[in-house]
């Protein structure tokens, strides 16, 4: 694989992507923008898949915030992240595109952006706006395009990836629209819900998902690819046809005084229209299919037959052989799962074949890797050797290096290891390997926890098209969940945990203590496991918040310093749809685990009104939550009380009626288990249970307040407890 060469694009310019990277595979489209911290603007990336007529083939070809996946999973929204850089806040919105799996009937992949701001706000208010393309296999930047001439536009066609003579090319477009996303997508054949153009008064209810729009409130929780809840109201075919013939109807893309015309173009009659009103994005933990199955465990019921039996597993060798065979069989038979596993390592989206215990000879010595994966697409073949460990089995550097040598001799592409060892996202491999052996062959690692998460992600989102294949995938997940499979969750803080814990209690922990690096490494892995665990229940990608300038070793050194100085271990998780990152802090001195989240207060209304706004969003939460208020100009909390008291006397969080409250912090504290393993009274279980409870009671229910162009309306929204909606 050659190194990618980044290209800086100018408006109207085009480039052949194969000239930038010889193996394209998948790409990540990253929309980046920054706005004033005091007056944030929310932008979103959208993708339209266009046929040879320059129009979408169906409404499913619009991939955006209400419809996060399309083309059979080839295009997927990953979600937003933000980072405060005083006095601005920088945002990114990412969509992954598997170029090898884009249907042949799609000629153009249009990349767009839209703005969710108050009336009068346009892209010109942003500090910068740009789009970048990264190669999916190694995140190498292929190109970037900066929009420098934005003004009042609220939607932009940034660029397009298109086919030309059998190759993918990119064109920088930079065409703006003053009338929003509705006009843009209508111009390309998307049928928009007529309710989207009825004005701000009707739009507020729909966007907030209140009782006026029950479909919005229910559909957002699903959020799955292709789910009915992701699209708007059902429109009979007769109504669609009649709308096009209505008196005064304007052609697609035309503008009228009252706003954009969104009359559907008469092509084929579709049963559903698309709504651009945002759904409440946070997933409900109660809707998790895995959670519902767990709740039935206590019921008296017969044991369903297993596709992958767990009976008769004897020693470690049999356990490893069964897990390998089950995993590779499903990789080869369930199309979506096989591609989810292999394409992230650079394989094309093609036909997957899997084999177990394939013999090779290196010198005079025989070697039998646990498995082999081969992916074919056209003239290209991608092959990887697989080494699997279950239970407490450990990967050995000399064995992996031997397989790397075999792979190089056989001209294979990769060696993949699978074990219970969980690695952080920025760790290439958990075993120290001679770098010279990886120059021509990639080496990658999968934990069983991540494999379990990939299963859950597809199942929770109903992303497997074939029902039989979905059953097979669910049976693999059921097998991995059984203790006899040897595919463990994160279940141990390591052999040095008790010593370090006791040293903290005694106040004698020193930075040079022998067991400290092991404990901080385990906690760093636990943070990644929390992302996999919660993300699997919700069917979304939860990621740890990492400092890109610090690698895993540096991050663990900072954890060691924190543990020595404060007696705490802290991780920050980014959960799509929540008002901000969730902080998980384990205080070993106080034996408490605390989960917290910050939410910005409304910018309109009195301080007391702002307090009521946040308490109304926590109407069903337990009263033992801690609520802190932060005033303008202060980094420290001005007041802190339990939620049960704040409900009775909101003024407890107000110091003076003239002091403006800028933010709140909501925290849940619970006892921290001291034991090193899993189960009742253990460190790991107490952290996991507290995070689940906090998400269910707090994080999934909080919604950010958005400024209104009408101060009176904004104050009224704050008083009612609902986020204000821009007009």
Image: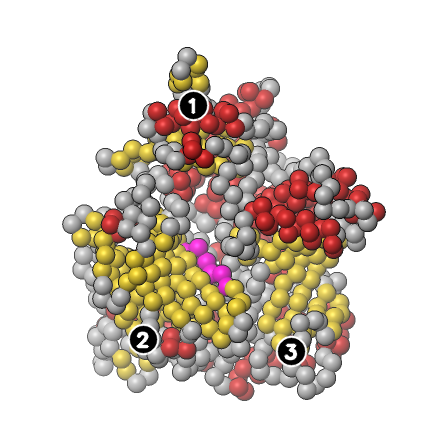
Q: Picture coordinates of residue 27 (x, y %)?
A: 35, 51
Identify the secondary structure beneath mark 2.
Answer: loop
The foreground one among 645 and 290 is 645
Q: Residue furthest top?
A: 364
* CA separation in Å, label 1 and label 3: 63 Å
Reading the image, the residue beneath label 1 is 356
* CA separation in Å, label 1 and label 2: 57 Å
Q: Residues within 10 Å of mark 1 (few under 14, many from 20)?
A: some
Relative to 260, residue 582 above or below: above
Mark drawn on residue 149: 2
Residue 182 visible in the picture: no
Q: Residues within 10 Å of mark 2 (few under 14, many from 20)?
A: few
Which residue: 36% across, 34% down?
440
Q: Picture coordinates of residue 245 (x, y %)?
A: 21, 74
Q: Nearer the viewer, mark 1 or mark 3?
A: 3
Q: Picture coordinates of residue 521 (x, y %)?
A: 63, 43
Residue range in magenta is 77-82
Reading the image, the residue beneath label 3 is 633
- Number of numbered discs on residues: 3
């Amino acid at each position: 694989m050659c190194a990618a060469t980044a290209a800086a694009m100018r408006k109207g310019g085009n480039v052949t992507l194969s000239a930038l990277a010889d193996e394209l595979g998948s790409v990540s489209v990253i929309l980046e923008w920054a706005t004033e911290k005091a007056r944030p603007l929310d932008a979103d990336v959208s993708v339209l898949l266009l046929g040879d007529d320059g129009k979408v083939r169906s409404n499913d070809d619009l991939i955006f915030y209400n419809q996060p996946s399309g083309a059979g999973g080839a295009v997927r929204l990953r979600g937003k992240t933000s980072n405060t850089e005083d006095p601005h806040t920088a945002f990114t919105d990412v969509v992954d595109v598997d170029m090898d799996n884009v249907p042949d009937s799609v000629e153009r992949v249009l990349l767009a952006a839209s703005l969710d701001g108050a009336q009068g706000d346009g892209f010109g208010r942003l500090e910068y706006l740009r789009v970048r393309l990264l190669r999916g296999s190694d995140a190498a930047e292929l190109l970037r395009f900066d929009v420098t001439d934005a003004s009042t536009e609220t939607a932009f066609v940034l660029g397009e990836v298109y086919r030309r003579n059998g190759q993918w090319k990119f064109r920088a477009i930079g065409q703006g629209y003053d009338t929003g996303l509705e006009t843009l997508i209508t111009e390309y054949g998307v049928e928009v819900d007529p309710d989207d153009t009825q004005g701000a008064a009707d739009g507020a209810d729909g966007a907030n998902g209140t009782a006026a729009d029950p479909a919005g409130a229910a559909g957002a929780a699903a959020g799955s690819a292709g789910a009915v809840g992701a699209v708007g109201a059902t429109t009979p075919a007769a109504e669609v046809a009649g709308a096009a013939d209505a008196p005064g109807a304007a052609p697609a893309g035309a503008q009228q005084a009252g706003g954009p015309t969104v009359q559907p173009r008469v092509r084929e009659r579709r049963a559903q229209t698309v709504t651009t009103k945002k759904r409440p994005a946070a997933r409900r933990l109660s809707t998790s299919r895995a959670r519902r199955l767990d709740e039935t465990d206590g019921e008296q019921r017969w044991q369903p037959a297993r596709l992958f039996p767990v009976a008769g597993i004897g020693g470690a060798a049999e356990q490893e052989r069964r897990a390998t065979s089950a995993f590779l069989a499903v990789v080869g038979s369930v199309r979506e799962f096989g591609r989810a596993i292999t394409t992230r390592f650079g394989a094309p989206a093609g036909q997957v074949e899997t084999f177990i215990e394939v013999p090779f000879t290196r010198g005079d010595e025989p070697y039998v890797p646990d498995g082999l994966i081969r992916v074919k697409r056209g003239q290209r073949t991608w092959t990887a050797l697989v080494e699997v460990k279950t239970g407490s089995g450990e990967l050995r550097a000399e064995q992996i290096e031997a397989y790397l040598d075999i792979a190089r001799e056989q001209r294979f592409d990769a060696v993949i290891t699978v074990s219970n060892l969980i690695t952080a996202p920025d760790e290439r491999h958990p075993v120290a390997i001679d770098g010279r052996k990886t120059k021509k062959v990639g080496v990658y690692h999968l934990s069983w926890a991540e494999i379990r998460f990939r299963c859950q992600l597809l199942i929770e989102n109903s992303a497997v098209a074939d029902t039989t294949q979905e059953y097979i995938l669910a049976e693999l997940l059921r097998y991995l969940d059984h203790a006899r499979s040897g595919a463990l969750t994160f279940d141990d803080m390591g052999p040095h945990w008790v010593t370090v814990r006791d040293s903290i209690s005694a106040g004698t922990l020193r930075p040079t203590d022998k067991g400290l690096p092991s404990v901080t490494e385990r906690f760093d892995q636990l943070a990644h496991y929390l992302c996999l665990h919660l993300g699997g229940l919700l069917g979304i990608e939860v990621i740890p918040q990492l400092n890109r300038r610090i690698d895993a070793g540096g991050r663990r050194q900072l954890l060691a310093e924190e543990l020595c100085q404060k007696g705490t271990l802290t991780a920050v998780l980014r959960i799509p749809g929540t008002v901000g990152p969730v902080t998980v802090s384990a205080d070993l001195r106080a034996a408490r685990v605390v989960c917290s989240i910050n939410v910005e207060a409304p910018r309109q209304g009195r301080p007391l009104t702002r307090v009521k706004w946040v308490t109304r969003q926590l109407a069903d939460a337990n009263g033992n939550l801690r609520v802190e208020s932060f005033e303008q100009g202060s980094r420290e909390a001005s007041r802190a009380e339990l939620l049960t008291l704040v409900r009775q006397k909101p003024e407890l969080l107000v110091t003076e009626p003239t002091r403006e409250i800028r933010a709140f912090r909501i925290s849940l504290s619970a006892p921290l288990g001291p034991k090193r393993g899993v189960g009742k009274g253990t460190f790991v279980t107490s952290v996991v249970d507290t995070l689940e409870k906090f998400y269910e009671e707090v994080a999934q229910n909080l919604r950010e307040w958005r400024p209104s162009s009408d101060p009176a309306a904004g104050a009224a929204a704050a008083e009612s407890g609902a986020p204000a909606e821009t007009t």
